[in-house]
Image (cartoon, rainbow, N blue to C red):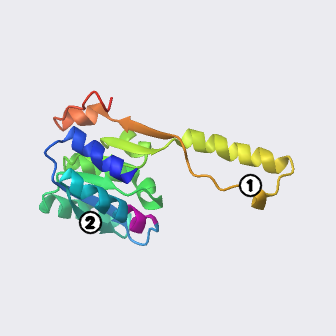
Amino acid sequence: SLGLRLQMLKEIIPKIRNVAVLKAKGDPNVVHAIAALEKAAPSLGIQLMQYEAKSSDDLPAVFQEMEQGKADGLISIAGAFTFANSTKIAQLTQQHRLPSCHGFRDTVVAGGLISLGPDMGAIAIEGANYVDKILRGAKPADLPVEQPTKMEVVINLKTAKALGLTVPPTLL
């Protein structure tokens, strides 16, 4: 889905070249995410610029570095850090006028541009189904581990308008 996030930014901003990648120090998702982005970027004509935050206090300086590095857009790697700081990240993307793509709808609701991520409602329902099975006698060790299967795209049209961007009908 990270390649798709990069592709969605490219569809909204066809001339995008330099994409900042926000990653959290110590997040286990980072290695896989960077590999997926590095695989997708060349075919889209995109250069990735990696920025790491250790804490929420680092975020303003990190976004300042992105601006100085002439980032045309931002991919935020989904994880506990970016989820917990979704509002602050959205505020900083607006402050720096940086079109952004996230893994959580919360960041888009708070002002980010677009997200592609798992449908958290569907995950909650599956979690409830697991609890039901356990309460009916199933052994947790016998239940399969499942990955999210339902993904959702969320677009903040107000943010797109504020950035002077037109969202193509294919994404709507």
Which of these two is toward me, 92 or 167?
167
Estimate how packed mark 1 is, as few (under 14), some (14 to 19) or many (20 or more) residues with alpha carbons within 10 Å: few
Question: Which residue is rendered at x = 24% and y = 30% of the image?
Answer: 168
- Residue 154 in picture, x, y percent from top left: 39, 37
Q: Quadrant of residue 10?
A: top left
The secondary structure type at the circle numbered 2 is strand
Which of these two is toward me, 17 or 67?
17
Which of these two is toward me, 1 or 50?
1
Q: Nearer the viewer, mark 1 or mark 2?
A: 1
31 is within the stretch colored magenta = yes
The secondary structure type at the circle numbered 1 is loop
Mark 1–mark 2 CB contact (< 8 Å): no
- Residue 122 in picture, x, y percent from top left: 58, 40
Residue range in magenta is 29-33
Among numbered discs 1 and 2, the one appearing first in the sequence? 2
- Residue 102 in picture, x, y percent from top left: 36, 49
Residue picked out by circle 2? 50
The dominant secondary structure in magenta is: helix
Q: Quadrant of residue 141?
A: bottom right
Q: Is residue 114 visible?
A: yes
Q: How many marks?
A: 2
Question: Which residue is rendered at x = 27% and y = 32% of the image?
Answer: 158
Question: Which residue is rendered at x = 72% and y = 43% of the image?
Answer: 129
Q: The residue under label 1 is which amino acid type?
A: Leu
Residue picked out by circle 1? 143
Question: Which residue is rendered at x = 13% and y = 62% of the image?
Answer: 68
169 is within the stretch colored magenta = no
How far apart in space, not on screen, are marks 1 and 2 (Cα)?
A: 38 Å
Which of these two is toward me, 155 or 6?
6
Q: The residue under label 2 is which amino acid type?
A: Gln
